[in-house]
């Protein structure tokens, strides 16, 4: 019987917890083996790599760096090429913009051996855009390459899908969003901003890539939505915050909106108004410190204007929602007929309230 092997490239803010979760949940998810790739032999990273290996993950490195890894006490079991060639699914967690065409050209060499390839974030052109709970039904056996959209795009898409489109496919008039982004991850020591820093609107129609990618996600479902986003970074390392404004054709009320949100198990509501309190909950109660929900909505912030305009604030479980989609897509590649039941094994890691 064919072994179901998942290979993760990268051990950063998405790669490291993803490797750990897959190792711990592999029997529930129908996975036989987890391998991962580390690019550079740094003693700084050795404790992390040692712990991933102890969890059962198997290390691959570039062939010309095997001795360098051995010199710091890390024994690779595979070269990168060997690990990819024997994998069933490859999840690339390397940073966006790091040579997309080179990345695709490289993986194209293995399309006859690997069932599916995933890339993270704004890797437009890598494959069909995907977010768990949004467009699962349009992912089919022809979609060997998938782009797991960014964490804020997950958040935006979940808000639109739940508040507007769950009523009817043409219920949304327009959606506007302000992504108030954290400066960097608490694990990172660079790219911190000293003060609020505004992003440019690179796209005339959609503003920033967040709305553009969300529109592209809904395009896979033959929906053409009027979305626009702005973004800025602020000097915090906790969580992204999103302000949303959705204009609807059908009248609604705060009670109706909250009912829709409560019925979506991928949405958490909270009374907390500060991101550090929500972040702390995820650190203490989540798996690998992550909240796997698509969004955490501040219940008291929800406002309904003239029965047709819904506004509010929510926090983005960065990494967590992308990790969930990565796992869901992986399990679908491996077990297309039973993946829903297997994904349900992660339900204890979702929260109704934070």
Image: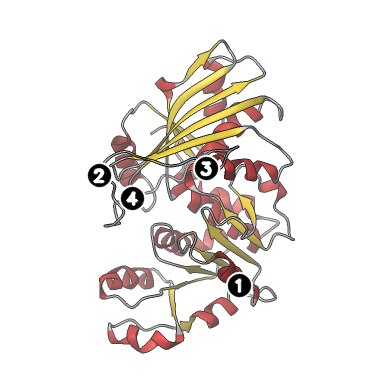
Looking at the picture, tell me which residue is in the foreground, 154 or 25: 154
Mark earlier in primary sequence (1, 4): 1
Q: CA distance from mark 3 to mark 1?
A: 26 Å
Q: Nearer the viewer, residue 302 or 194?
A: 194
Residue 8 picture location, percent across and down: 49, 67
Residue at 49% over, 59% down = 96
Q: What x and y, as percent, mark residue 4?
A: 59, 70
First along the sequence among labels 3 and 1: 1
| Residues marked 1 and 4 touching at CB (< 8 Å) | no
Instruction: Say which residue label 1 marks.
Output: 107
Side of 279 relative to 336 (left or right): left
Label 1 – label 2 distance at C-alpha:
39 Å
The tag earlier along the polypeptide, 4 or 2, is 4
Residue 312 image offset from top left, x and y in percent: 46, 24
Q: Which residue is mark 3?
A: 210
Reading the chain from its start, which is encountered first: label 3 or label 4? Answer: 4
Callout count: 4
Question: To which residue does mark 2 refer?
Answer: 194
Visible residue check, residue 265: no
At x 66% / y 17%, what residue is drawn? 250
Residue 278 vertical placement versus 57 (above, below): above
In the picture, the disc for residue 184 is 4
Which label's residue is closer to the chain start, 1 or 2?
1
**Which quadrant is the N terminus positioned in?**
bottom right
Q: Is residue 187 above or below residue 222?
A: below
Q: Secondary structure at mark 4?
A: loop
Q: Nearer the viewer, mark 3 or mark 1?
A: 3
């Amino acid at each position: 019987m064919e072994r179901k092997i998942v290979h993760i490239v990268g051990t950063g803010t998405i790669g490291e917890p993803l490797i750990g979760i897959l190792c711990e949940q592999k029997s529930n998810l129908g996975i036989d083996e987890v391998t991962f790739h580390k690019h550079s032999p740094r003693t700084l990273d050795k404790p992390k790599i040692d712990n991933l290996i102890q969890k059962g993950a198997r290390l691959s490195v570039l062939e010309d760096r095997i001795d360098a890894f051995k010199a710091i006490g890390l024994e690779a079991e595979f070269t990168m090429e060997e690990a990819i060639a024997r994998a069933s699914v490859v999840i690339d967690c390397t940073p966006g913009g790091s040579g997309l065409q080179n990345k695709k050209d490289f993986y194209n060499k293995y399309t006859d051996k690997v069932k599916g390839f995933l890339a993270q974030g704004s890797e437009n052109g890598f494959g069909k855009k995907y977010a768990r709970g949004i467009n699962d039904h349009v992912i089919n056996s022809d979609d060997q390459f998938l782009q797991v959209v960014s964490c804020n795009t997950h958040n935006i898409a979940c808000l639109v899908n739940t508040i507007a489109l769950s009523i009817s496919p043409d219920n949304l008039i327009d959606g506007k969003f302000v992504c108030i982004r954290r400066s960097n991850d608490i694990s990172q020591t660079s790219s911190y901003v000293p003060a609020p820093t505004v992003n440019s609107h690179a796209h005339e129609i959609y503003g920033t890539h967040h709305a553009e990618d969300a529109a592209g996600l809904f395009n896979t479902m033959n929906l053409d939505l009027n979305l626009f986003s702005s973004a800025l970074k602020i000097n915090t390392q906790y969580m992204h915050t999103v302000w949303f404004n959705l204009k609807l054709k059908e009248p609604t009320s705060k009670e109706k909106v909250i009912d829709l949100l409560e019925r979506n198990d991928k949405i958490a509501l909270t009374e907390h108004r500060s991101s550090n309190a929500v972040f702390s909950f995820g650190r203490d109660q989540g798996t690998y410190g992550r909240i796997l929900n698509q969004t955490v909505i501040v219940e008291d912030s929800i406002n309904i204007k003239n029965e047709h305009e819904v506004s509010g604030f929510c926090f983005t479980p960065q990494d967590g929602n992308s990790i969930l989609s990565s796992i869901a897509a992986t399990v679908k590649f491996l077990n297309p007929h039973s993946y829903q039941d297997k994904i349900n094994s992660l339900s204890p890691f979702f929260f109704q309230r934070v």
